């Protein structure tokens, strides 16, 4: 079943074309990687899908319904949640309170939201710091907190924007294991990432953006050997390792 349809989306900022006629489809349960050089339009595309930006042309459909002009809050209620490249916690609130904000979207009471929050914190290994203030967390824990808050909304589609940015190799490995556990629950993902071992180990399919345009799409091995992707993004050294 097709869950998401991005149809000929264009987004401009003044004279800059951030996305130019980009199209893709995403099936339910699929893990899609979105890669490309800095400035290629990856985060802009996530912002359009999640309602933070309105497209200047084209449309976004989720479960067959057009969401192109919907507000982020409405899109979240429909079942799309996201994390941010730059973490955005409620700094003065505890871990428990941060995630409860997400859980309240579909909970009938604070008690129910707290119960759901504690289950997610246990799942993500944050239960032992649930009373800590977000401003006191390490970057690795903040990344998990962002993920926990998004999961608390019970998304059908989860958008991850550089969820391992700034983490050390051990922390990256831990995050990969967490995402694999999330995938087992059947959630659909779009992952924006520069850490290629994460993309190659998790994704069924990869879309490559360059200067706002889609230049390639295919399975991981196909993308790793695509001459244009190698030239503009991966480089020959990566291909030799793959």
Image (cartoon, rainbow, N blue to C red):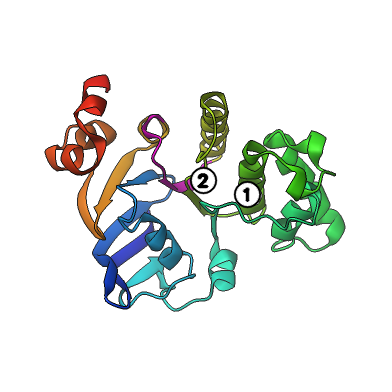
Given residues 128 and 217, the one toward you in this image is 128
- Gap in angstroms between the C-alphas marked 1 and 2: 16 Å
Q: Do the residues bearing badges 1 and 2 touch, measured as CB atoms within 8 Å? A: no
Outermost residue, top side? 241
The image quadrant that residue 17 belongs to is bottom left
Q: Which mark is residue 187?
A: 2
Q: How many numbered callouts?
A: 2
Give, as a single range, the part of the protein colored magenta. Answer: 186-197
193 in magenta: yes
Left or right: 238 as drawn, with respect to 67: left
Say which quadrant the C terminus sits in.
top left
The image quadrant that residue 23 belongs to is bottom left
Residue 64 seen in the current view: no
1 or 2: tag closer to the N-terminus: 1
- Seen at 58% across and 33% down, the residue is 178
Please state the horizontal and vertical placement of residue 77, each as a whole percent of the image.
Answer: 59, 67
Q: Is residue 90 above or below residue 173?
A: below
- Seen at 36% across and 53% down, the residue is 26
The image quadrant that residue 139 belongs to is top right
Q: Is residue 196 above or below residue 135?
A: above
- Seen at 52% across and 26% down, the residue is 173
135 in magenta: no
Left or right: 53 as drawn, with respect to 59: right
Find disc 1 in the rendering and name its residue: 146
Label 1 CA crowd tier, 10 Å (few <14, some 14–19, many 20+): many
Given residues 67 and 235, the one toward you in this image is 235
Given residues 66 and 179, the one toward you in this image is 179
Left or right: 110 as drawn, with respect to 202: right
Label 2 CA crowd tier, 10 Å (few <14, some 14–19, many 20+): some
**Is label 1 in a helix, a strand or a loop?**
helix
**Is label 2 in a helix, a strand or a loop?**
loop
């Amino acid at each position: 079943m097709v869950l998401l349809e991005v149809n000929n989306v264009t987004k401009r900022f003044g004279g800059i074309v951030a996305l130019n006629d980009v199209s893709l489809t995403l099936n339910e349960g699929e893990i899609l990687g979105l890669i490309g050089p800095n400035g290629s339009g990856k985060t802009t595309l996530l912002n359009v899908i999640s309602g933070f930006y309105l497209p200047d042309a084209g449309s976004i459909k989720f479960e067959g319904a057009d969401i192109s002009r919907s507000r982020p809050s409405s899109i979240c209620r429909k079942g799309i949640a996201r994390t941010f490249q730059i973490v955005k916690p409620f700094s003065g609130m505890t871990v428990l309170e941060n995630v409860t904000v997400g859980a309240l979207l579909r909970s009938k009471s604070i008690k129910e939201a707290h119960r759901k929050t504690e289950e997610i914190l246990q799942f993500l290994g944050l239960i032992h710091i649930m009373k800590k203030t977000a401003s006191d967390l390490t970057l690795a824990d903040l990344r998990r907190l962002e993920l926990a808050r998004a999961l608390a909304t019970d998304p059908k589609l989860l958008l991850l924007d550089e969820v391992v940015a700034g983490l050390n190799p051990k922390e990256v490995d831990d995050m990969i294991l967490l995402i694999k556990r999330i995938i087992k629950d059947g959630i659909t993902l779009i992952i924006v990432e520069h850490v290629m071992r994460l993309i190659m180990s998790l994704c069924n399919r990869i879309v490559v953006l360059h200067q706002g345009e889609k230049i390639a799409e295919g399975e991981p091995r196909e993308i790793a050997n695509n001459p244009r992707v190698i030239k503009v993004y991966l480089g020959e050294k990566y291909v030799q390792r793959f």
